[in-house]
């Protein structure tokens, strides 16, 4: 989590390691960050989880400022609801195994 000019976390990735980058201009990037934070509550340090939530808020503010007139406030909650439904379905399938 960071900014292009001051975060070198991608340097730690293996050359052949798959990665996904969410840009602040995309309201769904903030949603992905929030979902990661929520799912990481039990396996990551509290400060890292809180940092992810804080970063998601910065991403939403950036997206709203960069995309005037785009309904980012509506898109994000709907995407979270869909993500929760998807995760619930995945969990149910795993439990059924």
Image (cartoon, helix red, strand yellow):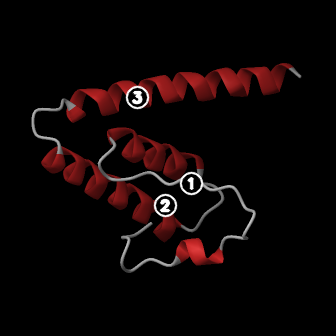
Q: Name the residue under label 3.
A: 79
Q: In this view, does 82 lie above or below 41?
A: above
Q: Cβ–Cβ below 8 Å for labels 3 and 1?
A: no
How crowded pointer 1 is (Cα within 10 Å; few <14, some 14-19, many 20+) is rated as few
Q: Cβ–Cβ below 8 Å for labels 2 and 3?
A: no
Q: Is residue 2 above or below residue 92?
A: below
The first of marks 2 and 1 along the sequence is 1
* Mark number displayed over residue 96: none
Q: In this view, does 21 lie to the left or right of 40?
A: left
* Residue 12 figure quarter: bottom right
Residue occupying the point 36% across, 24% down: 78
Q: Is residue 33 above or below residue 5?
A: above
Residue occupying the point 54% across, 21% down: 85
Q: Cβ–Cβ below 8 Å for labels 2 and 1?
A: yes
Q: Where is residue 64 in the image (x, y as percent from the top left)?
A: 17, 44
Q: Name the residue under label 2.
A: 49
The first of marks 2 and 3 along the sequence is 2
Q: Where is residue 35 in the image (x, y as percent from the top left)?
A: 50, 43
Foreground residue, 19 or 90?
19
Which secondary structure lies at badge 1?
loop
Foreground residue, 91 or 13?
13
Real-space Cα distance between discs 2 and 1? 6 Å
Real-space Cα distance between discs 2 and 3? 20 Å
How crowded pointer 2 is (Cα within 10 Å; few <14, some 14-19, many 20+) is rated as many
Q: Name the residue under label 1.
A: 41
Q: Nearer the viewer, mark 3 or mark 1?
A: 3
| Count of marks, rendered view | 3
Q: Which of marks 2 and 3 is in front?
A: 3
Q: Which residue lies furthest to the right in this view?
A: 97
Which secondary structure lies at badge 2?
helix
């Amino acid at each position: 989590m960071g900014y292009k000019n001051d975060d070198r976390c991608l340097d730690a990735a293996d050359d052949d390691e798959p990665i996904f980058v969410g840009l602040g201009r995309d309201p769904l990037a903030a949603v992905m960050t929030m979902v990661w934070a929520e799912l990481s509550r039990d396996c990551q340090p509290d400060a890292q989880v809180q940092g992810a939530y804080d970063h998601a808020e910065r991403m939403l503010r950036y997206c709203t400022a960069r995309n005037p007139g785009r309904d980012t406030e509506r898109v994000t909650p709907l995407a979270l609801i869909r993500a929760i439904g998807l995760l619930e379905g995945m969990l149910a399938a795993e439990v059924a195994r």
